[in-house]
Amino acid sequence: AEEDNPDALAINAIAVYGTYDSLYDLAAEIVTERFLPPMDWLVMRVALPLASLHAGTHLSKFAPVRELDRIAPRPILFIHGKEDAVIPFDRGKALYDAASQPKYRIWIPQGGHNDILNDVDTGKIVAEFFKTAQAVL
């Protein structure tokens, strides 16, 4: 959606589930919480670069927060579970906080990472969002 080509520009609205602001910051937070030294060092300095080689891109530089301004003025809906054990809620909230208007959010109090995808009520809200969302010009 942030690219400057006809396909990307044809996207009128965006909904993101369980997302994050910066892959490097997300990885650092997870590694700090879940790995003891020296594994924390190995993951950040060996595993992340190896994953980058495999993906063919520098993953530690991937930061959706830097692309938000290129999406505006199209509306974006953020959906995140507050009990997400895969991508901490604070990472999704940080992305929401950095976004320009028009932006909307659904924070699911007991929602885990995969729970939010199967929540019927949230699905109805997302469907209505796509029916009514319009860019603010």
Image (cartoon, grey):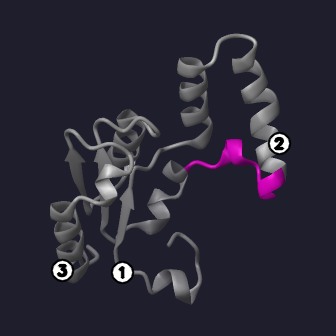
Q: Nearer the viewer, residue 100 or 118?
A: 118
Residue at mark 3: 132
**Disc 3 residue crowd, few under 14, some 14–19, many 20+, Cα 10 Å:** few
The disc label shown at residue 50, or none = 2
Q: Mark 1 falls on what kind of element?
A: loop
Disc 3 secondary structure class? helix
What amino acid is labelled 3 in the image? Thr
Residue placed furthest toward the top: 37
- Residue that appears at 26% across and 63% down: 102
User: What's the CA distance linking mark 2 and mark 3?
Assistant: 43 Å
The kind of residue tagged 2 is Leu
Q: Is 16 placed left or right of 6 in the picture?
A: left
Is residue 81 rendered to the left or right of residue 114? left
Q: Nearer the viewer, residue 105 or 135?
A: 105
Residue at horizontal 44%, vertical 67%? Answer: 71
Residue identifier under label 1: 12
Dividing the picture into quarters, in which one does residue 13 lie?
Answer: bottom left
- Relative vertical location of residue 86 with respect to residue 126 in this rendering, above or below: above
- x and y, in percent, of residue 4 in the image: 58, 78
Q: What residue appears at the point 38 percent right and 60 percent down from the top-left corner?
A: 16
Residue 82 appears at what percent x and percent y?
A: 28, 37
* Nearer-the-camera pick, 34 or 24: 34
**Circles 2 and 3 in contact, beta carbons < 8 Å:** no
Name the quarter where the C terminus is drawn: bottom left
Residue numbers of the magenta segment: 54-63
